[in-house]
Amino acid sequence: MALGERIPAWFLGIDAFFELLSIIAIVLLIWFSYKSYKLIGEKKYFWFSAAFGIILLAFASRMFMHLCLYFGWTDFIGKVLHMLSWSAFVYVVFFLLAYIILFAIAMEIHDKKMMIAIFLLIALILYYSGNYLMIFQYIAIVLLFIIGWKYFEYYWKKRNKNTLLISTAFSFLCLSHIAFGLIAFTDYLYALGHLFQLIAYLIFLYFIIRVWKK
């Protein structure tokens, strides 16, 4: 989830391929999650589908930003409409909202007012922080680590393969944010972050297909 100006020149085009694969996996994930909800009737699959639908919107925001960079629209948009910076912020906020929904599912939190309050509080912190992109990476790492650990605890108690798959997927997603947060050290972490992200979405997709088939 590194953005715009931090994309290594050698990875341009390759990142688009990774993003395309991620988007395809997310679209399928949304579809099978919703089908599982309709089939099983468990509300968590509906919210699972909603969370990844929001992530899909985040990817759309980033694609818009990358198009601006590719076609050289950054000067016009940056000076006149400020859309480029807003696109990055919207991207971060969408991911934040999706992660909070996934956090609520894992922790079995049903108080929607509480979750809205948490989301607004974190969004305000991001907006008024000096570097909201980096702060978001830290918040995402913490949320995803807690979620991944929670599902691992579920697996340890019941030895259910599905919970192990979910825990592994969240672990890879957490690793992707760690990699994106450390790209100042080496550009190769940007590529590694994309790889971890794609692996996470593919594991999520495999999990939800298993649920849907059952």
Image (cartoon, helix red, strand yellow):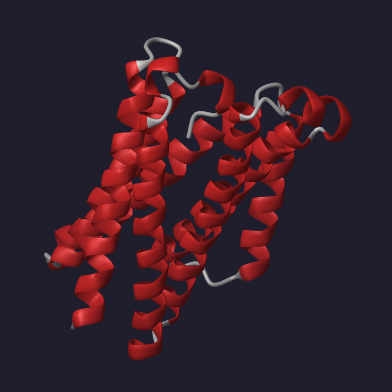
The residue drawn where x is 72% and y is 29% is: 73
Q: Nearer the viewer, residue 164 or 158?
A: 164
Across and down, in percent, residue 114 comes to 64, 62
Looking at this rendering, what residue extends furthest in the right direction? 80
Q: Name above or below for residue 17 compared with residue 8.
A: below
Looking at this rendering, what residue extends furthest in the front direction? 71
Q: Nearer the viewer, residue 137 or 20?
A: 20
- Classify residue 98 as left or right of residue 38: right
Q: Quadrant of residue 176?
A: top left
Can residue 149 be seen by looking at this rendering?
Answer: no
Across and down, in percent, residue 189 comes to 34, 21
Across and down, in percent, residue 1 comes to 48, 35
Q: Quadrant of residue 208?
A: bottom left
Total numbered labels = 0
- Classify residue 136 as left or right of residue 166: right
Q: Quadrant of residue 113?
A: bottom right
Across and down, in percent, residue 67 comes to 60, 36
Looking at this rendering, what residue extends furthest in the top direction? 185
The residue drawn where x is 52% and y is 19% is: 6
Q: Name above or below for residue 198 compared with residue 11.
A: below
The residue drawn where x is 56% and y is 34% is: 136
- Classify residue 50 as left or right of residue 94: left
